[in-house]
Image (cartoon, coloured by chain):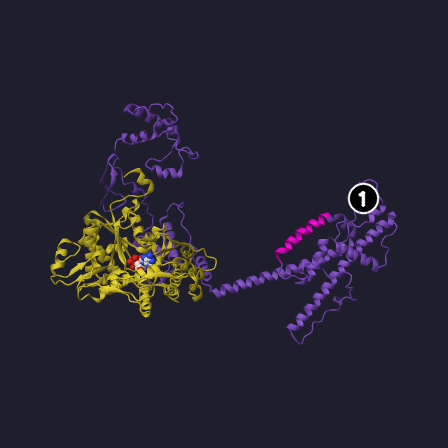
Amino acid sequence: MSAGNMLYGGDEIGALVFDPGHHSLRVGYAQEDTPKAEIPSVVGVGPSAPDTNMDIETKTDNNITQNNADTRKYYVDTTYVNVPRTQMEIQTYMKDGMIDNWDLFEKVIDYTYAKVIQSDPEYHPVLFSEASWNVRNNREKLTELMFEKYNVPAFYLVKNAVLAAFSSGRATALVVDSGATHTSAVPVHEGYVLSQAVVKSPLGGDYLSMQCRQHLEKQGIDLSPAYKIASKDVVKERDNARFTLRKLPENLTQSWQNYMLKSLLQDFQMNILQVLENPYDERVAAQIPSVHYEFPNGYHQEFGSERFKLAESLFDHAMLGAGQLASTSVGMCDADVRLSLFGSVVVTGGNTLLQGFPERLNRDLQLRAPSNTRLKMISANGSVERRFGAWIGGSILASIGTFQQMWISSQEYEESGKGQVERKCP
Amino acid sequence: MADVRDILDIERANTPEVTRESFLVQKRRNFEKAKGVSKRPEGMHREVFALLYNDNKDAPPLLPTDTALGIGAGYKQAKARLGMKKVRKWEWAPFNNPARTDGAVFHHWRRTTDDQKDYPFAKFNKQLQIPTYTMTEYNTHLRTNVQKWNKAQTDHLFDLAKRFDLRFIVMADRWDRAQHGVKSVEDLKERYYEVVGLLAKAKGQNSDKKSYAFDAEHERKRKDQLKKLFERTTQQVEEEQMLLNELKKIEARKKERERKTQDLQKLISQADQQSDVATNVQSARKYEKKLVKKKLHHQPRPSKVDSVVNAIEIGGSGIKFSDLRGSGVSLRSQKMKLPANIGQRKVKALEQAIQEFKVDPSPPPTEEICNAFNELRSDMVLLCELRTALSTCVYEMESLKHQYEAACPGKTLNIPPSLIPAEPIKEEIIEPGTSASTNA
Ligand SMILES: Nc1ncnc2c1ncn2[C@@H]1O[C@H](COP(=O)(O)OP(=O)(O)O)[C@@H](O)[C@H]1O
């Protein structure tokens, strides 16, 4: 312990930070500024049928785990999941912002310790983030899992909204988080979530992907992901694509194909979609230069006003639009805290990287806020800071000297069991 | 051979060889020098400190001045100096945190030379003193309002108070509604401070520790009003804004009217004190200028009457004739000359008036006639201006009448005869004001 640390208030104890989301699990060491790894929150589950080729691979890679009782094979992380394999189903372990399939989740944790952290769990206290609406049962289960199975020396659970607020240097904030499956507005007051005023909607990145898919299919655009394409020719804009298909293993599952299609759509959505600052207006949209996109099969075209029309669906919903969501949440809080919430609105989550998202949210919220309120939007500029807001907050929190007394230690767990997580991690 | 001295063939002083001894000497010297300047807290990194303070608060040098410090070959030295201090080792060491009750041991990096003090962050572990009570205390003192607060609820309240360090907003959020019913922030505060006060009284605690009286009614009312303020719909806000604007307009109009009456009053009194005015014009001008400026700020509805009255004001009614005192010998007739600063319009009006009243335009300039003639002409100008004002007023009255009749068809506006001028005004004397606002 040096005096230097004392000055800045930091004290690093080798803790790990996990931030599970629907899109990915972020994991890394506390006190670092970005996660060590971002692992998709899906697992490929393959049959046990002995495929000679595959077996060799299996033995050398310990990310593909095999239980004695359960002979299925599990594939974790992008490089393994994205390979076309016979009968490999894609499953997610998340549901409604919470961990749902614990077996699959354990596979991912195993993989994380083995491949990412490359160290034993008993040396590292673990800080987990959770959804603000996580339920007691789930929290206790996670506590139990970490202590019983992984023998962590200490454990702590924090709401991801609180962490996102911390990463922007706020203890009181309205956190608007737009991720893959949902958008939520969570008021945080002095480091605690006001749980009665949490509002969420199912309009997130995946919803946009779906909108894009419908739109593109209606246009008759072929959405073959890159894995299907062996080669392609250069064609003129809007000309039919000329490409040859790759030879693929048989019996690719629908879930895997959907997953790969979603990756393609997410790329489209990242590059093409944009939100207007004011509600969608054909004339305004028509004046903005169109953007060019080339699909994996070589087909390419310019996209004009539909870029804005597709993205508009996140905002124009009367009840679930992001602006409405935020103002509803503030309206449910005690009148004394509303001004301070409006005074720091933290925007986080990958989906808010959609061009123009913070500006539009600002405009929508300004309209709904009482006329003389000071509204301040806080959105990290870097895409890393925005996507990993909650993880970074966790990284900061777990490496603060005064936080080290908060952990649930393994001693405490032995004494009072998993029930204390409700009390110790409010 | 890269040095400019090499190029100019100037002999270069030999760089003294760095020996351990010379080093230490220099180092001490540097250290002594630095002592007075830098107040860097121990352990703060130099880069961070530099953001706060400059080493000697000077502007940074334009050129690198490593050698100017008199140390000699700067870079070489700096490099060598780094290695001179003995490396202090870090180790991954276990520590005990006295702020924890379980004695759990964590590890962190620590200098082996640092002594094993208590965990330095433990001292930040401050806890609020939340009073506690026993069963008997509760039964004897705290059963004040049994329907509203039973023991279980009070216990829950104090548990939350401890867990959330009296953050009442969070406490109200985590309040167990299913078991204990709905309670507002004010309810919680009221009960908490009531209990604290009662306990303090019962225990006869030293009175310097004041217990706070919580005015729940006042707080509830305040919050109600705050809520109402927040929950106004846009229409309500707009309506309020509109009403406020209307109010402002009405007030502005009222002020205008008052001002107008005042102006008229002034004109009338000015007619009386014509001679006075002549001497006071200078100061009056100033005042009028101010007035004009002010007028520009609130002009809810430009009125012709207004502009005319104003024009008279600006013009400074009457004429100021120069007295020729102190300018040497002069003809008396000079006294009757119109001063140069009178506007063309006024001059013309004056000429017409002189014709109209059949006055000799250039009477013999005896002392008396001079004075009387000057006064007469001054009055004439005022007269002309008043006429214009009158005609504008009449015109405006007429137009308002028409407006009224157009707005409420079938009705006629009866103008009281006292307001109608006895004889038609001679329009030809002065064309009604040509100032900018006339055509508005
Ligand atoms: N640069 C970007 N532009 C637009 N959308 C993005 C961008 N990066 C990520 N996204 C979207 O953000 C979503 C993932 O957000 P994230 O916060 O990681 O979700 P979660 O917290 O649920 O894991 C995906 O739907 C993805 O399409």
Question: Which quadrant would the C terminus of chain A be assigned to in this image?
Answer: bottom left
| Residue located 73% across and 65% down the image | B394
Q: Which stretch is magenta?
A: B282-298
Q: Is B180 positioned to the left or the right of B348 in the image?
A: left
Q: Colour of chain A?
A: yellow
Badge 1: how crowded within 10 Å, few (<14), some, or many (20+)?
few
Q: Residue furthest bottom?
A: B410
The quadrant of the rendered image in which ligand 1 is seen is: bottom left
**Image check: B362 left or right of B290?**
right
Q: Position of residue B229 (x, y in %)?
A: 47, 61
Mark 1: which amino acid? Leu
In the picture, the quarter occupied by the N terminus of chain A is top left
What x and y, as percent, mark residue A413?
A: 21, 52
Decide which of B155, B202 is in the foreground and name it.
B155
For disc 1, the chain is B
A149 and B331: which one is in front?
B331
Examine the rendered structure and indicate whether residue A332 appears above or below residue B365.
below
Question: Can residue B429 be seen in this snapshot?
Answer: yes
Say which of B426 and A7 sits in front.
Answer: B426
**What residue is at 20 percent from the left and 66 percent from the top?**
A253
Confirm whether the magenta stretch covers residue B387. Answer: no
Determine which quarter of the picture holds residue A8: top left
Q: Position of residue A347 (x, y in %)?
A: 37, 56
**Residue A186 visible in this rendered orientation of the protein:** no
Determine the colour of chain B.
Answer: purple
Q: Report x, y in % for residue A12.
A: 27, 44
Judging by the rendered image, the residue that carries numbered circle 1 is B324
Q: Is residue B290 magenta?
A: yes
The quadrant holding residue A68 is: bottom left
